[in-house]
Image: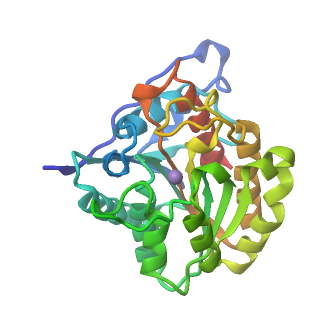
């Protein structure tokens, strides 16, 4: 079977129980239920089609391992691990369809689902499930990414470079897309113009580096006009020294502290404008290209915020 669901595996980690009840780490909160949930999408099919460095299929396991060892925050609650949708070889479309089914099912059970990618092809599977569970809702898409990922699917079909183009095709009138952290040199003029034609909003990496609050107004505005927010984080937005283990490392990048601030701003904007953040994903971790587990730690730190924020 090229696309399968792998059940959740037991979490393990460092045990500091000699320090008492408050000495818990995240692995001790992994469960089969909870208001928040994690689901893996073990796929590198989109990265391969996009001619990138493969390895993202190992992302979900590396992310769980990095998460497991973090100290639990004061408000930690048990969270559900829903296992992985695993995509072997080039079976991208079937993988996205199965991810969509699992996402829709999970959204019926949990207040917030975080999908652990996988290449950025994860996003289109996430979106399928979101639309299935929330039909007729205005979805605000917030992408933290160095790239627009608005390319037209070419001869090889959809890839990790096309998910937001596919979302626009699926719902041209409802498409509401905010991209934060874009690197000018990593996006062709054709894509920048397409984004403008499609009403996308962009905040460049340079602007966020100069002022971490540069996107505050755009984040508040999309939260105000949306019923639900969908946050997708491509960790190739981070500088290469904080995220070497991605398909396309960034020479400049937006630093982790700023990206943490953006995630917090999205969570609090949803709260203050009466919309929700039921779905987020984090993509492009490629463990074979990581150094000392640094990229996995950077990504897991963002997952921890979304899990308990
Ligand atoms: Mn991307």
**Residue 106 placement (x, y as % from top left):** 42, 61
Residue at screen point 42% across, 71% down = 166
Q: Is residue 288 above or below residue 160?
A: above
Q: In terms of depth relative to the viewer, which is nearer, 243 or 267?
A: 243
| Left or right position of 282 against 269 | left
Q: Confirm whether residue 215 shows in the render.
A: yes
Q: Is residue 206 above or below residue 29?
A: below
Q: Residue most toward the front?
A: 189
Q: Residue most toward the left?
A: 1
Q: In terms of depth relative to the viewer, which is nearer, 14 or 277?
A: 277
Res 25 → quadrant: top right
What is the number of callouts on the image? 0
**Residue 272 placement (x, y as % from top left):** 79, 68
Q: Is residue 277 above or below residue 61?
A: below
Q: Confirm whether residue 34 shows in the render.
A: no
| Left or right position of 96 against 305 | left
Q: In terms of depth relative to the viewer, which is nearer, 204 or 174?
A: 204
Q: Is residue 158 above or below residue 288?
A: below
Res 128 → quadrant: bottom left
**Residue 234 placement (x, y as % from top left):** 55, 48
**Residue 124 placement (x, y as % from top left):** 42, 64
| Left or right position of 185 against 262 | left
Residue at screen point 85% across, 54% down = 213
Residue at screen point 23% across, 51% down = 90
């Amino acid at each position: 079977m090229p696309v399968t669901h792998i059940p959740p595996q037991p979490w393990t980690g460092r045990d500091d129980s000699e320090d008492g009840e408050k000495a818990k780490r995240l692995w001790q909160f992994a469960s089969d239920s909870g208001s928040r949930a994690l689901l893996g999408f073990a796929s590198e099919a989109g990265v391969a089609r996009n001619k990138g460095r493969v390895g993202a299929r190992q992302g979900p396991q590396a992310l769980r391992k990095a998460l497991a060892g973090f100290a639990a925050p004061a408000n930690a609650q048990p969270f559900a691990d829903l296992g992985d949708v695993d995509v072997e070889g080039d079976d991208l479309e079937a993988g996205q369809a199965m991810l969509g089914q699992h996402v829709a099912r999970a959204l019926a059970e949990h207040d917030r689902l975080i999908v652990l990618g996988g290449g950025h092809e994860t996003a289109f599977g996430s979106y399928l499930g979101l639309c299935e569970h929330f039909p007729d809702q205005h979805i605000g898409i917030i992408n933290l990414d160095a790239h627009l990922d608005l390319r037209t699917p070419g001869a090889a079909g959809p890839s990790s470079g096309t998910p937001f183009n596919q979302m626009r095709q699926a719902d041209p009138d409802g498409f509401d897309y905010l991209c934060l952290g874009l690197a000018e040199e990593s996006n062709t003029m054709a894509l920048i113009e397409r984004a403008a034609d499609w009403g996308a909003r962009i905040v460049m990496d340079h602007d966020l580096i100069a002022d971490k609050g540069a996107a505050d107004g755009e984040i508040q505005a999309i939260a105000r006009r949306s019923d639900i927010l969908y946050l997708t984080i491509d960790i190739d937005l981070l500088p290469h020294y904080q995220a070497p283990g991605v398909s396309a490392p960034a020479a400049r990048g937006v630093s982790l502290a700023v990206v943490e601030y953006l995630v917090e701003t999205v969570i609090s904007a949803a709260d203050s404008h009466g919309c929700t953040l039921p779905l987020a994903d984090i993509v492009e971790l490629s463990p074979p290209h990581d150094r000392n587990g640094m990229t996995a730690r950077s990504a897991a730190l963002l997952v921890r915020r979304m899990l308990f924020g």
